[in-house]
Image (cartoon, rainbow, N blue to C red):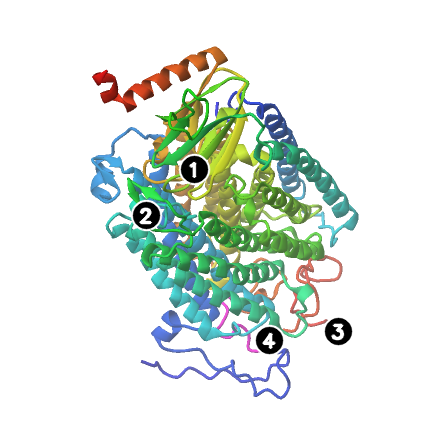
């Protein structure tokens, strides 16, 4: 159902979901109290013959207590949020040795650049796959993301990860997936008439599967790149 | 042109007027304009201008609500065809199917028109114009001509917005936020409609700035004798802060709009970086950055939320006091909290940009400031609820809407905590949680403020009461419909369902069609409720029960003049000797002390 956050499969998930549920509980309780209080007051203090309204301008103590409780609550949430935020978005948070991929967004597709057989990104044997991001499970991954035309937003609900990809800027997006399987990538920033179908997949493999997939695709890419050379041999 | 001369109004000197004693006797106190044109069309009377604003907003809302119905139809039944709609709206539908780019036009225009041309016009310009002179005790606004000018500046803006649907490539479709490069590049899909959108925003901003300056000048300089700042009704306080916020922040949007227009038409690159490639073409732009626009837009865009929500809350405070028969709880704290909310609201814009790619440290700062707004805002919210404590509540229609407004703040305010916390926002940004949240804050809260104000001040505007029964049915249909729909949107967003998606069945992780259908029907119910409101409005204009000067037994100054208020509001300006909400039962024969009551000698 709609109100259940999708099953999470990244290392960010436990921390983000915990905060999410804490806020859910706090705001849920506050919501019930406010609405019940409102309805209760509306009935209890309806005009009745023989009862006069209480002439009172306010109560400083009550307001101080109320504000203090709110302050403590939001400060605690804030303190809990900062380390999680830094872990996901911090400028120096991308783990050393993360597997790197190029992601180029354009109307209306995600192009993923993979390191070729040499294992190095941005070399001649790199190859591109459209709308398909394949990564190994339990490995740190970093996406070097750019956009060609307008702003797009890289969103993997199952990873709790969202990052706008902005033309002229290079975004470093990192994650570590914890369960193999295919997960949807959505474009979360309005990017034009085809925005709604700018959908892609991240496929999380076991390491063996991933190595096999990478080798196959690299070979395929190589043969596609030099069809004449292959034919003349 | 002129009709027979009316009896000259007696020119009493106005002892209550705050003007210096040597000032020439009452420049304002001449009789009202007599010709149809100067009286009803090019009037400089603040009450006529207020009604012009309110009816313009009502007219624009018909379109904005209509567009939302088309949006909801698409989201509920994305794969059905509607041949009838093809013939009704040939520009939007083809072979019975809504075009994806026109779906985006509908969402863009719904947002733009609702925020700037319905809610701003009705709540700030409309009620502000009507109530400021009447509640502070002035004959008119400080600058009546500027006031009329500001209204007539808005008219071409409205017309331009509507016309944009009929140009090639249709109305603007880059979202009401109009982020470049999408909004800057015709190649990427933003056509002439986007240019017109920008050109229409210009007169709107000019008008709103003129109006805001007028409000601030009137509130600061035109208060009657005894109306000290801390005796002003909360409606005036909220309108004051809303005007100041508007004056301080709209220039950022003006700048952004001009730069975006230049990027579109002049070949500049304020928001366009080097190396853009659109459909295989390399564009010649270089040196700009798209994020600059977002900062400028939200520098206005976030305070705009308070520009809209605060006056609604102010109206609610007035209504709660009048229909609860007790002073507003914590008046002084409310005034200071509104100031704090406004000040913090000006430096919190970045929470709309947590995932935008701005520096993460900046994200932390904006998260902290945003969550800090919770403190003064919760003071305001609790003072609203506490104003009911041990009151004598009379559940007339204005009061029902004020109570509904509190209930909506309960949802919208708490939702703000989810979105203001950067970490949870990472997941919820651009989802329907955001859509549900802002529909509560600048849809339901402001809408209910407008309705409360309309039912409350209708007698003062037109000298007649609105129908209570129709009003109550209108309230319940609106409440049930909007709360069900916008709560449902929160739940959609928790499931990760994204906004601005033409086909809601696209993503497998977010398949919630039954909920989408439910939301659409809930909003249809709410929209039908507005038909009752329109019927009530027009029926009451001509057939409503005649109202006396003070039909609600309220204390504030507007109720000391006749209904409808005459040309100069008062022959002699009232003198104020007490605070705005002196509902007390001790020695007052009527159970309350009006602000303008002459101190009884015995």
The residue beneath circle 2 is B283
Q: Earlier in the sequence, mark 4 or mark 3?
A: 4
**Label 1 and label 2 in one chain:** no
Q: Which residue is mark 4?
A: B573
Quadrant including the C terminus of chain B: bottom right
Relative to residue B268, is residue B31 depicted above or below?
A: below
Magenta span includes B566 = yes
Q: Residues within 10 Å of mark 1 (few under 14, many from 20)?
A: many
Specify the principal SS of the magenta part.
Answer: loop
Looking at the image, residue B228 lies above or below residue B387: below
Judged left or right of residue A50, residue B236 is: left
Measure the C-alpha gap from mark 1 to mark 4: 65 Å
Q: Which mark is residue B601?
A: 3
Q: CA distance from mark 1 to mark 2?
A: 16 Å
Q: Is residue B337 left or right of residue A7?
A: right
| Part of the protein shown in magenta | B563-572
Check the image and report above or below for B569 versus B444.
Answer: below
Q: Secondary structure at mark 3?
A: loop
Q: Nearer the viewer, residue B149 or B135?
A: B149
Mark 1 sits on what residue?
A146
Chain ID of residue with mark 4: B
Residue for point 39% across, 35% down: A105
């Amino acid at each position: 159902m709609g109100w259940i956050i999708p099953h999470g499969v990244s290392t960010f998930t436990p921390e983000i979901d915990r905060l999410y549920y804490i806020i859910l509980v706090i705001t849920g309780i506050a919501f019930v109290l406010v609405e019940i209080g409102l309805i209760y007051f509306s009935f209890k203090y309806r005009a009745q013959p023989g009862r006069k309204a209480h002439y009172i301008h306010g109560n400083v103590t009550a307001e101080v207590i109320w504000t203090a409780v709110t302050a403590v609550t939001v400060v605690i949430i804030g303190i809990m949020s900062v380390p999680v935020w830094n872990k996901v978005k911090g400028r120096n948070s991308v783990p050393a040795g993360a597997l790197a991929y190029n992601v180029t967004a354009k109307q209306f597709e995600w192009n993923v650049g993979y390191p070729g057989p040499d294992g190095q990104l941005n070399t001649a044997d790199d190859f591109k796959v459209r709308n398909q991001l394949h990564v190994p499970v339990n490995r740190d991954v970093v996406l070097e993301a750019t956009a060609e035309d307008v702003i797009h937003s890289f969103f993997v609900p199952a990873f709790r990860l969202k990052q706008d990809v902005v033309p002229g800027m290079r975004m470093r997006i990192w994650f570590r997936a914890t369960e193999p399987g295919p997960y949807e990538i959505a474009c979360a920033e309005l990017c034009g008439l085809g925005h709604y179908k700018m959908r892609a997949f991240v496929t999380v493999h076991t390491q063996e599967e991933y190595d096999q997939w990478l080798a196959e695709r690299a070979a395929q890419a190589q043969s596609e790149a030099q069809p004449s050379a292959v034919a003349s041999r | 042109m002129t009709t027979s001369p009316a009896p000259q109004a007696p020119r009493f000197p106005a002892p209550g007027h705050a003007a210096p004693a040597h000032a020439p006797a009452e420049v304002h106190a001449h009789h009202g304009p007599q010709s149809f044109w100067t009286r009803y069309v090019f009037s400089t009377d603040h009450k006529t201008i207020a009604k012009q604003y309110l009816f313009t907003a009502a007219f624009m809302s018909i379109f904005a609500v209509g567009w939302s119905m088309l949006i909801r139809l698409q989201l509920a039944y994305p794969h059905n065809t509607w041949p009838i709609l093809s013939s009704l709206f040939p520009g939007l539908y083809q072979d019975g199917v809504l075009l994806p780019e026109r779906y985006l036009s509908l969402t863009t225009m719904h947002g733009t028109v609702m925020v700037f041309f319905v809610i701003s016009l009705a709540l700030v310009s409309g009620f502000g114009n009507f109530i400021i002179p009447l509640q502070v005790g002035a004959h008119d606004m400080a600058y009546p001509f500027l006031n009329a000018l500001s209204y007539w500046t808005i008219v071409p803006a409205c017309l331009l917005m509507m016309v944009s649907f009929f140009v090639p490539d249709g109305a603007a479709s880059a979202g009401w936020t109009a982020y470049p490069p999408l909004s800057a590049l015709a190649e990427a899909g933003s056509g002439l409609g986007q240019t017109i959108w920008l050109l229409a925003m210009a007169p709107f901003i000019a008008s709103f700035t003129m109006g805001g300056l007028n409000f601030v000048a009137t509130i600061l300089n035109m208060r009657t004798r005894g109306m000290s700042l801390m005796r002003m009704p909360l409606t005036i306080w909220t309108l004051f802060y809303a005007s100041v916020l508007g004056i301080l922040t709209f220039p950022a949007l003006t700048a952004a709009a001009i730069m975006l227009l230049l990027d579109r038409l002049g070949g500049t690159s304020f928001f366009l970086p080097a190396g853009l490639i659109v459909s295989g073409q390399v564009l010649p732009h270089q040196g700009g950055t798209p994020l600059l626009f977002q900062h400028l837009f939200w520098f206005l865009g976030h305070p705009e939320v308070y520009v809209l929500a605060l006056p609604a809350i102010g109206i609610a405070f007035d209504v709660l006091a009048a229909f609860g028969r007790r002073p507003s709880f914590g008046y002084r704290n409310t005034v200071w909290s509104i100031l704090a909310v406004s000040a913090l609201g000006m430096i919190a814009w970045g929470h709309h940009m947590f995932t935008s790619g701005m520096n993460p440290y900046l994200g932390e700062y904006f998260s902290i400031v945003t969550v800090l707004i919770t403190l003064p805002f919760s003071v305001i919210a609790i003072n609203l609820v506490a104003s009911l404590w041990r009151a004598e509540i009379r559940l007339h229609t204005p009061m029902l809407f004020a109570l509904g407004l509190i209930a909506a703040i309960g949802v919208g305010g708490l939702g703000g905590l989810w979105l203001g916390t950067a970490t949870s926002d990472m997941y919820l940004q651009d989802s329907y949680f955001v859509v549900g949240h802002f529909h509560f804050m600048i849809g339901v809260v402001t809408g209910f403020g407008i309705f409360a104000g309309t039912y409350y001040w209708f007698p003062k505007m037109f000298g007649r009461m609105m129908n209570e029964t129709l009003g109550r049915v209108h309230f319940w249909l609106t409440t049930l419909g909007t709360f069900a729909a916008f709560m449902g949107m929160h739940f959609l967003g928790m499931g990760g369902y994204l906004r601005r998606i033409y086909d809601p069945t696209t993503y497998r992780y977010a398949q919630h069609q039954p909920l989408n259908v439910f939301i659409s029907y809930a909003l249809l119910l709410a929209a039908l409720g507005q038909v009752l409101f329109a019927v009530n409005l027009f029926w009451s204009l001509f057939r409503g029960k005649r109202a006396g000067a003070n039909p609600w037994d309220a204390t504030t100054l507007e109720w000391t003049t006749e209904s409808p208020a005459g040309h100069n509001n008062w022959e002699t300006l009232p003198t104020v000797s007490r605070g705005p909400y002196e509902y007390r039962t001790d020695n007052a024969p009527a159970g309350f002390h009006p602000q303008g009551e002459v101190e009884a000698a015995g």
